[in-house]
Image (spheres, helix red, strand yellow):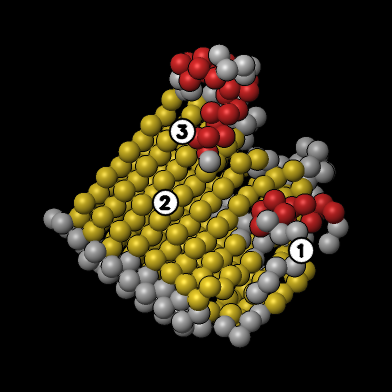
Amino acid sequence: MDAIQQNLLEQVAGLHEIPAGAYNIRANGQMAGRNTTANIDIVSKEDKSGIDIRIKPGTRSESVHIPVVLSQSGLKESVYNDFFVGEDCDITIIAGCGIHNGGSQASEHSGIHRFFVEKNARVRYVEKHYGAGDGNGERIMNPTTEIHLAQGASLEMETVQIKGIDSTKRVTAATVAHGASLVIREKIMTHGKQYAETDFVVNMEGEGSSVNLISRSVAKEHSRQLFKSRIIGNSSCQGHSECDAIIMDDASVSAIPELTANDIDANLIHEAAIGKIAGEQLIKLMTLGLTEKEAEEQIVNGFLK
């Protein structure tokens, strides 16, 4: 891999070298490296681009890295990755995609991930998006995530998109069974004329199931953001959706939370707040010697931390 691709790997997966454990590294549409372990198998799909990751029941304290990097201007790809997590597992999955576009053609990655998490298994999933390059070609990412949580299973998902992506539409659909738990935290910052859309749909199918959707975003300059979340309570369950956004300059932010209760014991809550940085916050930091721009940056960084 060249220096550009190595930098992308570091940005999206924190990799300075080949990781320990299982991994599959994809660069410009091709496999750039793969390793399996006794408990984690990775196999290429035969009918389309992508991989199957199978994790044996009882696997604990292991990780899987599956980063994707694109440095070829004009490359567009759709990749299908399926995760089969056995019962009683406790694992971490590090994904993410970085695009460096130094040309005039749009580069696009659409990652379609499906999670089948079996009884009492625990998964921590981290996905980071990053864009760079001095070309005028767009950097586009459209991730789709499908989650199936069996009885007592849990998945904690963290998504981060802070820099360089011109357009993204994230679609996440989940089914949560008896006693299962889903937590999703997303952090987004847009600037220029960038556009970011998030669409969450969660079906609460089992008694004692829970979901917590938390979105924090900052929209600068002329960028636009749209946050949509829908929680459907079909059982005795706990559901919470929260969207907090800072709007700056001439940006636009829309939040559309929706709750549907189909069971008398479904307890569903949504919260949404959009606003500018409070003047007193800026003044307080500026009295400590910061410029207005420095104060804004510090507030934004703290908000997205």
What is the distance, in whole Å, between disc 3 and disc 1 at their CAs?
36 Å
- Residue occupied by mark 1: 17
Q: Which residue is mark 2?
A: 200
Q: Residue furthest bottom?
A: 38
In the displayed structure image, the side of residue 79 where residue 101 appears, left or right: right
Left or right of 58 in this view: 107: right
First in sequence, mark 3 or 1: give its number. 1
Percent position of residue 235, x then y: 21, 62
SS at mark 1 in the image: loop
Q: Nearer the viewer, residue 136 or 179?
A: 179
Q: Label 3's element?
A: strand
Query: Mark 3 sits on what residue?
Result: 245
Q: CA distance from mark 3 to mark 2?
A: 17 Å
Q: Is residue 239 above or below residue 278?
A: below
Observer able to see residue 289: yes
**Image coordinates for residue 232, horizontal then vertical, percent:** 28, 55
Q: Residue at x 27, y 69 (%)?
A: 178
User: Which is more toward the observer, 169 or 21?
Assistant: 21
Report crowding for label 3: few under 14, some 14 to 19, many 20 or more residues within 10 A (C-alpha): many
